[in-house]
């Protein structure tokens, strides 16, 4: 993918910088982990520091000193999951801030304006992330609203100008919960609109993993082949591998940073629980196959000690490692694809990697 | 000062790495701020991770991956301030750990053995940091104990071997509270022992600042001219400047890192309260005279936002800046001394620097 702030090689994982910071990591840290693009959350940034500050700073890139590509979500997901909903209208949502209870409105037009002002290289259409489970009737209703909102987002986006002189892009989002026919209906409606790329939304929200992959497979099959496909909110390393095999190009998830803060560190053998007593005098690095700053300089015993002593340094060292591992994983998949050997590589990966039930879910 | 892990240019400030980490900073961060030597706390490290782990790691340098000089305190200060005292005997102290209540013993011999095993380039004699205020009788009593303990520390140190093949050093500590004649008595007793350097202890513990400088002046005057003088637990930038003018060579204090975590950032004009509302849309760096990573890349508005949003990244960015400022301050003093212009430089510094009552004390 080509953006003004740089080219992006896919499949790609996007670390999540919720409130203008990928938790515990600096821009230099992100570059060192080979991050190509990061994600910002419209809902959080709109509420704090607020768009007035971001506009005065010259956009989010400048405010947080990130010179590479950036994607923002539409704010819709957090409005529904964090905010206290006031009213869902046909063309707008009013909600109370989870920070101070103040009343706010989000609509396709407002979401797009905010994302323009954030300066996102890739903006997302304003949609409703249908909760799971939902009845067929609820999903039909939600889809109608989502399709209208996305059409409104596209219209507002095309009508507006790039905020800071560089080109911005807009992705549409396919919804439809776990109903195959409704997913088909959604992909048909959304793929017909002139978006720059397409996301698969409404998954990784509690449904069985088999349903997640079934829907991903169904939708990815029907999305335009020459435009990027983004599976939102996914996921664990083994999920990324499976989704790439289904044709997904882009991912985001708080899992690597959140797990890091809980002492769960990823390796090619599976997650390692570095706080466990068995690592007390374990002077190996987290992974001797990893080139990250943490693995090159510190032992499991030291990381365990830092967790025990509540030393904040470990949040950075652990996050650095996990984000580095995720980017290593994506780079390895890109290489296997280029070599025409993805299926073989995937078998090898899965035969070695042991998932752990104790991982912290996103 | 010359140590196996590197030469140290004085006057020098030593960041405090309490539990094997200078809070929020990695070894690379410390190098970037031009740290020459860091301090480790014997009491904390002895209790957690414990000497078994540190010995297996090959010493504290290796455990925390710090390749430059390191000083450890004797543990005495924390035993008296953090531990729950069980019994002070003539030759040992028993105390309960503040972590789990377990019972431990510290003596000159044990403290020296721990510091040997930590692998400190500079160890400190085991002493009693007299609380302030204390009656003359209490100080006389405490001094008697301290002088015996220090003699015992020196004996144990000379009897033992360097733990990891490189040379370790031992400093003595002058006590005597704020009684000039007892300070004189202490400096006479301690300076007569064959220590590699001398510390002024028992200050910055609540006494008036005038008394602190009076005692420092008195003691520094009488310490051997060709050995380093270390004023323990000091302090604010203006205190360092004053103490250097009295002949002090070494300092340690948690103030720059602790203040950083509270949003109080040092500049040549005085401390800046970056969380204050007036910095909401303040896109200047903390200091445009500062070459640290934080000032080169981020605005006051962004740091303020990170504090507001409880983003852990800001603890590192703020600590980086404050430690960098402290090392800049020391480097500037070294330069002024070399140029034979310290008094003039000091006048200039003080005429510009405005201390703030809102600073967090160590």
Image (cartoon, coloured by chain):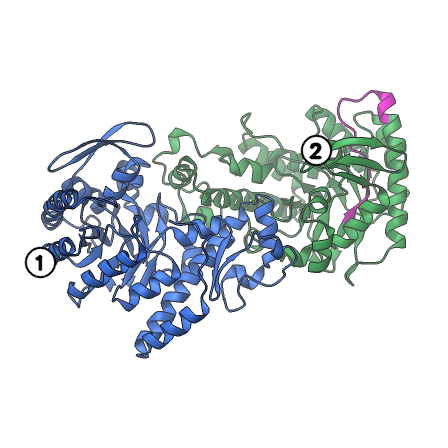
Chain colours: A green, B blue
* Label 2 chain ID: A
Q: Which residues are magenta?
A: A123-139
> Residue at position x 42%, y 47% from top?
B23
- Judging from the image, what secondary structure is the residue with disc 2 in? loop
The residue where tag 2 is placed is A82
**Spatial separation of the CA atoms under disc 2 and disc 1:** 68 Å
How crowded is the residue under tag 2: few (<14 C-alpha within 10 Å), some, or many (20+)?
Answer: some
Q: Is any atom of residue A187 visible in this view?
A: yes
- Please state the chain letter of the residue tagged with numbered disc 1 in the rendered image: B
Residue at the (60%, 63%) spot, across then down: B284
The structure residue drawn at horizontal position 80% and vertical position 31%, both measured from the top left corner, is: A86
Say if B224 sits above or below B22 in the image: below
Label ID, residue B192: 1
Count the marks. Answer: 2
Q: Is residue A134 magenta?
A: yes
- What percent of the width, then of the height, locates residue B68? 32, 57
Q: Give above or below for A326 relative to B68.
A: above
Residue B183 point in image, percent of width and height: 16, 55
Q: Magenta segment: does it hold B86?
A: no
Which one is nearer the viewer's eye here, B263 or A127? B263
Select label 2 or label 1 by which is in front.
1
Q: Please provide percent x and percent y for residue B30.
A: 41, 56
């Amino acid at each position: 993918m080509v953006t003004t702030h740089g080219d992006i090689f896919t499949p790609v994982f996007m670390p999540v910088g919720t409130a203008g910071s990928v938790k515990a990591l600096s821009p230099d840290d992100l570059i060192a982990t080979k991050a190509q693009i990061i994600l910002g959350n419209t809902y959080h940034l709109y509420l704090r520091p607020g768009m007035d500050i971001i506009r005065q700073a010259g956009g989010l890139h400048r405010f947080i000193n990130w010179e590479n590509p950036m994607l923002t979500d539409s704010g819709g997901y957090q409005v529904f999951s964090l905010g206290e909903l006031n009213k869902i209208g046909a063309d707008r949502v009013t909600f109370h801030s989870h920070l101070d209870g103040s009343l706010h409105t989000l609509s396709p037009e407002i979401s797009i304006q905010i994302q323009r002002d954030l300066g996102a290289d890739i903006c997302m259409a304003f949609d409703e992330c249908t909760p799971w489970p939902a009845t067929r009737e609820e999903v039909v209703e939600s889809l109608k609203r989502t399709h209208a909102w996305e059409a409104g987002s596209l219209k507002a986006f095309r009508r507006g100008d790039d905020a800071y002189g560089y080109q911005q892009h807009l992705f549409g989002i396919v919804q439809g919960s776990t109903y195959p026919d409704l997913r088909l209906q959604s992909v048909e409606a959304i793929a017909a609109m002139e978006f720059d790329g397409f996301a698969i939304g409404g998954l990784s929200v509690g449904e069985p993993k088999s349903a997640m992959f079934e829907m991903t497979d169904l939708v990815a099959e029907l999305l335009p082949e020459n435009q990027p496909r983004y599976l939102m909110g996914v996921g664990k390393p083994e999920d990324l591998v499976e989704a790439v095999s289904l044709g997904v190009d882009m991912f985001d998830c708080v899992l690597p940073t959140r797990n890091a803060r809980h002492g769960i560190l990823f390796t090619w053998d599976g997650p390692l629980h570095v706080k466990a007593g068995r690592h007390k005098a374990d002077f190996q690095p987290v992974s001797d196959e990893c080139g990250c700053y943490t693995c090159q300089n510190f032992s499991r015993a030291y990381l365990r000690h830092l967790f025990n002593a509540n030393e904040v340094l470990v949040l950075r060292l652990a996050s650095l490692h996990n984000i580095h591992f995720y980017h290593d994983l994506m780079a390895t998949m890109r290489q296997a694809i280029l070599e025409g050997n993805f299926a073989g590589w995937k078998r090898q990966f899965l035969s070695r990697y042991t998932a752990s039930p104790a991982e912290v879910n996103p």
